[in-house]
Amino acid sequence: MVVVEPCLTELSPEETREEVLRRAQEFVDALTKPRKLVARVREASEGALRYEGRDLLEALRNLNSDFLDRGWGDGFPIVAPTREALDEMLRGTSRGRDDLVLVMEPGRGLATVEKIAVNCVMAGCRPEHLPVVIAAIEAISEPEFNLPMVSQSTGPICPLLVINGPIRKELGINCGGCVLGPGAPSRVNTVIGRAVRLVMMNIGHAYANIMDMDCIGTPNKYSMCMGENEEASPWEPLHVERGFDRNTSTVTAFPCESFSNVADQVHFVPEQLLDIFAHTANEPNSTAWSWLLPNKPGWNRENLIVFCPEHAQILGKAGWTKEQVRRLMFYKARIPVGLIKAQLLRAGRDTAWNWLLRQPDDMPVQVVRDMKAFHIVVVGGSGPKSAYMFGMGEPVTKEIRS
């Protein structure tokens, strides 16, 4: 990788051209000379590493300090990935430790079962969590998820995992209150989401300020995993909608840019309640213009509506289906084109925009390409608080297999 500073988006076209030409030799060197590993992420040449101290706690502190220096940690204390702990983790799957699951973007790292298991140990997972993490890695690596952009963007994008099926109860995955943490109820959710992030770093090489160029960052990147509260939903669960049997355990990965709390304890009529969700979706900076970009893979942003059980029951008791919810959202979640003309001009600079730029500023534009871009799950505990997740790409669902 060649890291170019300043960020090119801060420069004019003329300055960008000058900067690229000035850096040309660095690109040539990167393509023609032996690869130089960044010191912070170098591989350990001595095989197993040994850490010592006056006692076990000091040795563990020394391990954590060194792992952070090497870039292998996420900033929180990790569990020591000893050979014994690794062997125990691998008992959670029937796959061979050297089996290649996939080649992981953006750094093209070889994601073997053993390497994924090492990161699961570091995250605090138990052996039975390993198949869930492997399925999640398979999901985020599908082209429609657009992992290269999720991993390297200057925006705060991260995988949001939704787990469905019997495995929710088998593993104790939280589907109710504080589903995204913190605390003991979401311990399993937290370690699974954390393991996925560590895999993205240590196998996909999405290290902060090296490949992950997030301008500000987000705590969502540490871990974002939840189970769907299928028992409290008036509708069929997410994985059944996506073609799986109800008794099949799955993980769905959404590329999530951000989310907004949707609080409504006043409206009990579906149209009035969904009005609040539609107004939340009308966020021009996150979604309203990007789907218009021609031939841009990964820009078909699909969003997730997370209904709390209370809001879902209001809709269900009124006989509303998910399809009706999507249809209302599609026609109400629109913004005036005047709010995005400046962004369209900067992003386009070609004739594809002419028809839209000629429209009056108050002409409404839908925030997603079609109704199918609104996905719906029921999550959480008591209380009239839902959420709207702004996406950056398309979700992918994978079966969790041992």
Image: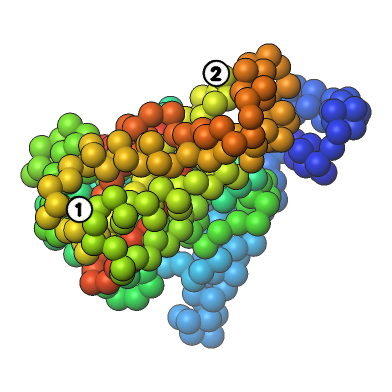
Left/right placement of residue 55 relative to residue 303 reads: right
Nearer to the camera, 241 or 71: 241
Mark 2 neighbour class, 10 Å CA radius: few under 14, some 14 to 19, many 20 or more:
few
Mark yes or no: residue 328 visible. Answer: yes
Nearer to the camera, 376 or 266: 266
Quadrant in the rendering for residue 75: bottom right
Mark 1 neighbour class, 10 Å CA radius: few under 14, some 14 to 19, many 20 or more:
many
Quadrant in the rendering for residue 276: bottom left
Q: Which residue is mark 2?
A: 295
Mark nearer the viewer, 1 or 2 = 1
Residue 199: x percent and y percent?
45, 48
The C terminus lies in quadrant: top left
Residue that appears at 20% across and 53% down: 315
Instruction: Report the number of discs.
Output: 2
Residue 11: x percent and y percent?
84, 37
The three-letter code of the residue at mark 1 reads Leu
Residue 346: x percent and y percent?
73, 31
Residue 315's label in the rendered image is 1
Using the numbered discs, state the Cα–Cα distance from disc 1 to disc 2 in whole angstroms: 37 Å
Residue 16: x percent and y percent?
85, 31
Q: Earlier in the sequence, mark 1 or mark 2?
A: 2
User: In the displayed image of the protein, which residue is found farthest to the bottom?
Assistant: 54
Q: How is the image coloured?
A: rainbow
The three-letter code of the residue at mark 2 reads Asn
Vertical placement of residue 181 versus 31, above or below: below
Left/right placement of residue 147 relative to residue 248 reads: right
Mark yes or no: residue 130 visible. Answer: no
Vertical placement of residue 370 versus 227, above or below: above
The N terminus lies in quadrant: top right
Report helix, strand or loop for mark 2.
Answer: loop
Residue 238's label in the rendered image is none
Report helix, strand or loop for mark 1.
Answer: helix
